[in-house]
């Protein structure tokens, strides 16, 4: 089973998914690291990516999932996965891919982006991210979390959801 924590830039994907992966000792992919350099440079200039820019990136992410699937490993990924078509592309990587949408108000996310340091993504791209976002549709396998909660609460809820789906118990020494 593969879990993709999705949402616009600044919604908390990396923070929350990274900690869930750590607690459940699952392989973790940060989708930002799979972008070809031209994509990262484009976003850093304040230009949104196109479907075409995102295609090779999504293919690399689906491949990463497929590789873990072939060694029967479940995974966690932090990936914006903004459009339905992108999620369908990722879902091609393995038979059971589930999504967790980190959702919240634009102004809260803008504040968090302004406070975040050391990241190439400018806050100016948030409106294009929000316009591109297609929320989960009823026939998609996923759930939504409200990002106005604390990181600890979100990690706890998401760990519970993932652990229940996997039929595992979070390890006690990883609880914090
Ligand atoms: N629930 C939260 N409450 C407060 N701050 C948060 C929360 N989630 C994330 N943050 C902070 O917001 C910023 C963006 O989070 P990040 O994980 O980098 O988002 P993304 O990976 O979706 O771009 C980071 O500085 C992070 O520490
Ligand atoms: O498809 C996209 O437009 C990008 O993938 C984008 O959604 C992603 O959010 C950036 O790579 C910034 O990275 P963070 O989401 O970690 O801020």
Image (cartoon, rainbow, N blue to C red):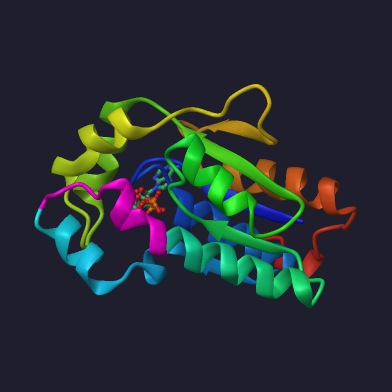
Can residue 140 be seen here? The reply is: yes
For the point 90% across and 53% down, the residue is 167
Counting from the top left corner in percent of width and height, residue 101 is at: 54, 37
Task: Identify the image quadrant of the C terminus.
Answer: bottom right
Q: Which residues are magenta?
A: 46-56
Residue 47 counted in the magenta span: yes
Looking at the rendering, which quadrant does residue 174 occupy? Answer: bottom right
Q: Say whether residue 58 is left or right of residue 2.
A: left
Q: On screen, 75 above or below 10?
A: below
Q: Percent from the top left, x then y, of residue 109? A: 31, 36
Q: Is residue 129 above or below residue 1?
A: above
Q: Where residue 108 sits: x, y (%)?
A: 31, 31
Q: Quadrant of the N terminus?
A: bottom right
Q: Is residue 80 left or right of residue 156?
A: left
Query: In this view, which residue lies farthest toward the top?
Result: 138
Question: In the image, 31: left or right of 155?
Answer: left
Q: Residue at x 68, y 41 (%)?
A: 157
- Is 50 on the left or on the right of 4, as rendered? left
- The quadrant holding residue 43 is bottom left
| Residue at the spot 39% in from the left edge and 32% down from the top edge | 133
């Amino acid at each position: 089973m593969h879990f993709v924590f999705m949402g616009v830039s600044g919604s908390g994907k990396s923070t929350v998914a990274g900690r869930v992966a750590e607690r459940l000792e699952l392989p973790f992919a940060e989708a930002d690291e799979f972008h070809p350099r031209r994509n990262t440079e484009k976003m850093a200039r304040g230009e949104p990516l196109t479907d075409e820019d995102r295609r090779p990136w999504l293919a690399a992410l689906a491949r990463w999932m497929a590789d873990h699937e072939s060694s029967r490993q479940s995974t966690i990924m932090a990936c914006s996965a903004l459009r339905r078509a992108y999620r369908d592309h990722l879902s091609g990587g393995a038979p059971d891919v589930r999504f967790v949408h980190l959702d919240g108000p634009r102004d809260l996310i803008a504040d968090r982006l302004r406070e975040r340091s050391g990241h190439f993504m400018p806050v100016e791209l948030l409106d294009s991210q929000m316009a591109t976002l297609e929320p989960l549709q009823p026939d998609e396998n996923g759930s939504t979390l409200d990002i106005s909660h604390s990181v600890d609460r979100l990690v706890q809820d998401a760990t519970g959801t993932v652990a229940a789906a996997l039929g595992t118990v979070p390890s006690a020494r990883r609880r914090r």
